Image (cartoon, rainbow, N blue to C red):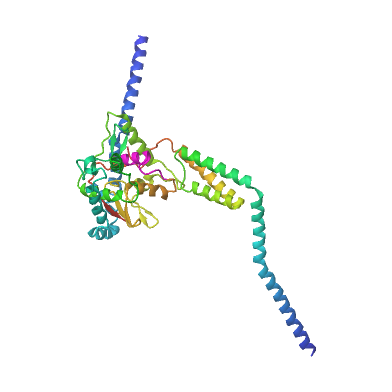
Amino acid sequence: MKMRKLTAMLLLGGAVAFASHSAVSADKPAAKAADKAAVTKAGNGGDKAAAEAAIAAAESARKKAASADGEWRDTGKMIKKAQAALKEGDFAKAVKLADKAKKQGELGYEQAQAQQELKMPSYLKY
Amino acid sequence: MKHLSGKLLLLSVVAAVAVAAQASAEKASPERDREVFENRYKERFPDVAKEEYVNGIYAIDPVGRESWEAIEEFPPYELFIDDGVVMWETPFANGKTYKDCFPDGPGIAHKYPYWDKEQGMVMTLPLALNQCREKHGEKPLKYKKGSINNILSYIASESRGQVTNVVIPEDDPRALEAYEKGKKFYYTRRGQLNFACANCHVQNPGMKIRSEMLSPALGHTTHWPVYRSKWGTVGTLHRRFTGCNKQVRAKPFKAQGEEYRNLEYFLTYMSNGLTLNGPGARK
């Protein structure tokens, strides 16, 4: 009888433990999503001015590259996406895209500067 | 005596500079560029005859050539030629036709591009067609897609057998300048992938980029406009320039803008001596 009671208690304890573990597991994605949402919200609320400044800097870098015929294909598109994110209030996304576009503008300009002088390739034998 | 040796020294310096300048000019001449360009392909594909390059990639890709030859039995560009005939013959609203602008037409593709001294720019056939339209009160056609390809297809088909013969007139230094700008464009690395046109089509023709074989630049200009299976229609040379620039992730330039017209001037000059065989069909 005692043995039966003990087994029953053990089974019950196991079931409770499993149930609570499952509940924790099920809560994890929800908690992660909530954390992410909180972070995004903080970013969104955080810095509209920073996003606007990042976009302006990106546009300036794009124009500089274009002035040297060195603009890359996707720079302008990235800036447009950044502007859309700014409009939607997703400032973190806007900054990220604008920074990437700015980098492209800078690299495009550097590339154009490095290519200013025509150097005929060595595989052409003059 | 001292005075004389000083003069002699000066003369030898002047002579040396003159010789160096002449050598440099010779090195940089368009004709020398063309010879060197052509030699590149002779070295790379010694078994391919020069005239074969008018067939583009199919000059060096025997497998692709089989499909292309099958396609050419029922050319996909024929309907565009037919529409081009109608365009050529239909009078504008003022009663004039293209023939009034191009009395030698329609087989005139071999005359383009050329240096237009009056306008101080490289004149291409699509630009000349639009200038004709505007002169007669018609709207200009778009330069990459659409009906400009119909009339270009007809003109190209009527120009088959003519020989590429781009001239860089010596009496106007701006012509050579335009050629040099086109050449500079061709060898300039651009875009996120840092490629020049020459990297694919002069350095590495015959090599593969993903599943596609890179075509040789020699003969690139002989067969436009082209029906590309990828496009599902006929498109212009400048549409292709745009596509190439996009592929290396560079922002393309405006079709029929100065950059691409100069590029066409240079690139067509490189194919001087090759027969025109447009319109073409490509993958």
- Residue A11, relative to residue B195: is it above or below? below
Going by the picture, which residue comes out furthest to the front? B94
Q: From the viewer's side, name the closer residue of B36 and A35.
A: A35
Q: Is residue B243 left or right of residue B57?
A: right
Q: Residue furthest right?
A: A2
Q: Quadrant of residue B263?
A: top left
In this orientation, does residue B127 appear? Answer: yes
Is A44 displayed left or right of B181 in the figure? right
Magenta stretch, overall SS = helix
Q: Where residue B47 sits: x, y (%)?
A: 25, 50
Which image quadrant is residue B185 in? top left
Magenta span of residues: B252-266
What x and y, as percent, mark residue B104?
19, 41
Q: Nearer the viewer, residue B275 or B58?
A: B275
Does residue B2 lie above or below B211 as drawn?
above
Can residue B215 be found in the magenta stretch?
Answer: no
Does residue B273 show up?
no
Say if the magenta span includes residue B258: yes
- Count of numbered marks: 0
Which residue sits at x=33%, y=19%? Answer: B12
In the rendered image, residue A36, in percent from the top left (x then y), is placed at 64, 59
Camera-side residue of B237 and B197? B237
Would you say A73 lies left or right of A120 here?
right
Q: Position of residue B202 (x, y in %)?
A: 34, 45
Tell me the quarter of the image containing the N terminus of chain B: top left
- Residue at image position (73%, 82%) is A11
Specify the quadrant that holds the C terminus of chain B: bottom left
Q: Farthest residue in the bottom direction?
A: A1
